[in-house]
């Protein structure tokens, strides 16, 4: 990747050193996937500090120089020797790490890495598309027989057989009245009609995320049509320069116009990449503008507590004419 972009952003924020501890950020910067504590120190150039356990593997796979991480004391000595005045950390950094890094410098939360990760490279898009293909191929051979957790395990097995490193997240399968639970864990219940499945594969570290809901009554089909109408409007609104909150509003307004606003209980979507949930968030609270080559989900849902729920989710590449990356039919009905 072009590290000059990071250097430029550091200059703008007057940050002399950035420290990255989150695994996904380390992978993004170095290409190495740590299994234990590691850190990227970015001054003039990035250096990967890998734990002793990871050191050999890091030297094989890292695209940036590697040294052994020994202690926070050494990090502090390095910062002191260079006369560092301002250190940038990720927002997710543990409080204990902040305490270990206290010194004669100012510690600030920097969003530089998230700004970069939101915009996907051509290669990243290809990785996501491969993860989508694996997930879609796997769902087509799924048999809805047995308990919900048995069907979830079957789907997870299919994804791994088809090349997924692992599930992008815990597979959601909820049927019957349980489909009103947006993030239901698969249960001991036998699979009933009206099945909501939210699943994703992982390829070279990159995630896919898709939801389909099968319906069995006229009321459920009516609700699915409303969900699809709102989703289509949201996708059509996606373009560089559009506020993420505006996409959410468009989707939400359509559902509200049908009288189901109170039944749409989550945001419209989110970014996907090395993590299944990352920026940007398509929510009313977001002040971000969409940019070319972001990847987002659009996933409206309508839920009736104790009765049923319907959610349809697709992944979209932000372009002047948005590109739907998901290929599976919106009304895909499971066997």
Image (spheres, helix red, strand yellow):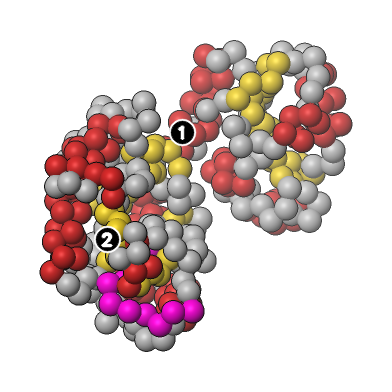
Task: Say the numbered circle drawn on residue 116.
Answer: 1
Left or right of 228? Residue 203 is right
Dot 2, how many residues are within 10 Å of its Cα: few (below 14), some (14-19), or many (20+)? many
Is most of the magenta stretch helix, strand or loop? loop
Closer to the chain start, of discs 2 and 1, is 1
Q: Name the element at disc 2.
A: strand
Name the quadrant of the C terminus: bottom left
Left or right of 239? Residue 63 is right
Q: Position of residue 143 (x, y in %)?
A: 34, 84
Which one is in front, 250 or 8?
Answer: 250
Rendered residue at 70%/16% (across/down): 106
Q: CA distance from mark 2 to mark 1?
A: 34 Å
Q: Position of residue 283 (x, y in %)?
A: 34, 37
Is any atom of residue 76 visible in this view?
Answer: yes
Left or right of 14? Residue 217 is left
Rendered residue at 80%/14% (across/down): 104
Q: How many marks?
A: 2
Is any atom of residue 203 visible in this view?
Answer: no
Q: Position of residue 270 (x, y in %)?
A: 38, 44
Rendered residue at 62%/42% (across/down): 22
When the figure is inspected, residue 149 is found, relative to residue 279, above or below; the finding is below
Which one is in front, 194 or 23?
Answer: 194
* Residue 194, magenta (yes or no): yes
Q: Which residues are magenta?
A: 188-198
Q: Position of residue 275 (x, y in %)?
A: 49, 49
Residue at label 2? 310
């Amino acid at each position: 990747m072009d590290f000059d972009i990071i250097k430029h952003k550091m200059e703008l924020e007057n940050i002399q050193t950035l420290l990255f501890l989150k695994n996904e950020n380390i992978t993004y910067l170095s290409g190495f996937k740590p299994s234990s504590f590691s850190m990227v120190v970015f001054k003039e150039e990035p250096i990967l500090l890998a734990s002793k356990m990871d050191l050999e593997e890091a030297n094989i796979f890292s695209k940036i120089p590697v040294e052994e991480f020994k202690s926070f004391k050494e990090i502090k000595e390095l910062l002191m020797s260079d006369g560092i005045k301002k250190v940038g950390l990720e927002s997710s950094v543990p409080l204990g790490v902040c305490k270990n890094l206290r010194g004669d410098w100012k510690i600030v939360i920097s969003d530089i890495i998230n700004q970069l990760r939101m915009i996907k490279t051509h290669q990243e898009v290809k990785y996501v598309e491969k993860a989508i293909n694996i997930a879609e191929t796997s769902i087509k051979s799924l048999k809805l027989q047995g308990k919900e957790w048995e069907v979830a395990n079957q789907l997870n097995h299919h994804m791994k057989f088809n090349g997924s490193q692992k599930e992008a997240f815990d597979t959601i399968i909820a049927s019957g009245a349980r489909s009103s639970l947006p993030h239901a864990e698969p249960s001991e219940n036998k699979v009933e009609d009206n099945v909501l499945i939210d699943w994703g594969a992982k390829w070279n570290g990159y995630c896919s995320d898709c939801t389909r809901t099968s319906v069995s009554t006229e009321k459920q089909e009516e609700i699915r049509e409303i969900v699809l109408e709102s989703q289509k409007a949201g996708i059509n609104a996606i373009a560089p320069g559009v506020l993420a909150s505006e996409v959410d509003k468009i989707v939400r307004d359509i559902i509200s116009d049908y009288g189901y606003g109170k039944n749409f209980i989550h945001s419209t979507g989110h970014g996907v990449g090395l993590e299944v949930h990352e920026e940007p968030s398509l929510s009313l609270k977001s002040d971000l503008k969409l940019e070319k080559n972001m990847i987002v989900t659009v996933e409206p849902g309508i839920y009736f507590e104790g009765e049923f729920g319907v959610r349809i989710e697709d992944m979209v590449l932000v372009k002047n004419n948005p590109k739907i990356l998901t290929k599976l039919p919106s009304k895909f009905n499971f066997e």
